[in-house]
Image: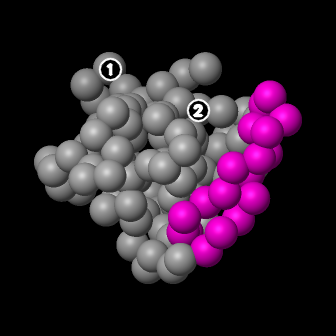
Amino acid sequence: MEHADKASPTENTDQHNTKANHNWNADMGASSHMMPHQHWIQNYQLKQIPIRLADDTTIYSEGVGSMLFEPQISRKFGKTVVLYRVLHTLKIQNNLLSIINLT
């Protein structure tokens, strides 16, 4: 898995998930972009969407929305892009960037 750092829209830590990581993991198996950081998500809508994990368990999203993503790899910033249908779930600790959704 590759990872990219993301410049957070705010430097505040997530009030509900202080253990959550701010880095992104590129995931070829993820069907959606996912994150535990609600404050990064724009146009947020409460929505429970089932998410099947690799160990065959199911968790649910808290909500969904879009976000601005500014990739940073080796201290170099890339072009800012909008990620749509980003799932917010408190059940994960890492941000997952869905390669399937990017291609």
User: Looking at the image, can residue 78 be seen?
Assistant: no
Q: Is residue 102 left or right of residue 86?
A: right
Which residue matches tag 2? 26
- Count of number-bearing discs: 2
Q: Is residue 74 left or right of residue 45?
A: left
- Of marks 2 and 1, the one in the foreground: 2
* Mark 2 burial class by Cα count in 10 Å: few <14, some 14-19, many 20+: some
Q: Amino acid at mark 1?
A: Ser
Residue displayed at 28% across by 40% down: 18
Q: Earlier in the sequence, mark 2 or mark 1?
A: 2
Residue displayed at 44% across by 79% down: 43
Residue displayed at 84% across by 35% down: 56
Report the colour scheme: one colour
CA gap, disc 2 and disc 1: 15 Å
Q: Is residue 64 left or right of residue 77?
A: right
* Mark 1 burial class by Cα count in 10 Å: few <14, some 14-19, many 20+: few
Tell me the quarter of the picture where residue 75 sits. top left
Q: Position of residue 44 (x, y in %)?
A: 45, 76
Residue displayed at 60% across by 66% down: 85
The N terminus - image quarter: top right
Secondary structure of the residue carrying tag 2 is: strand
Q: Amino acid at mark 2?
A: Ala
Which residue matches tag 1? 74
Q: Position of residue 61 (x, y in %)?
A: 61, 60
Secondary structure of the residue carrying tag 1 is: loop
Which residues, given as a range, are shown in magenta?
47-64
- On whether residue 51 falls in the magenta region, the answer is yes
- On whether residue 101 falls in the magenta region, the answer is no
Q: For the view shown, which residue lies furthest in the left direction?
A: 11
Q: Is residue 63 left or right of residue 68?
A: right
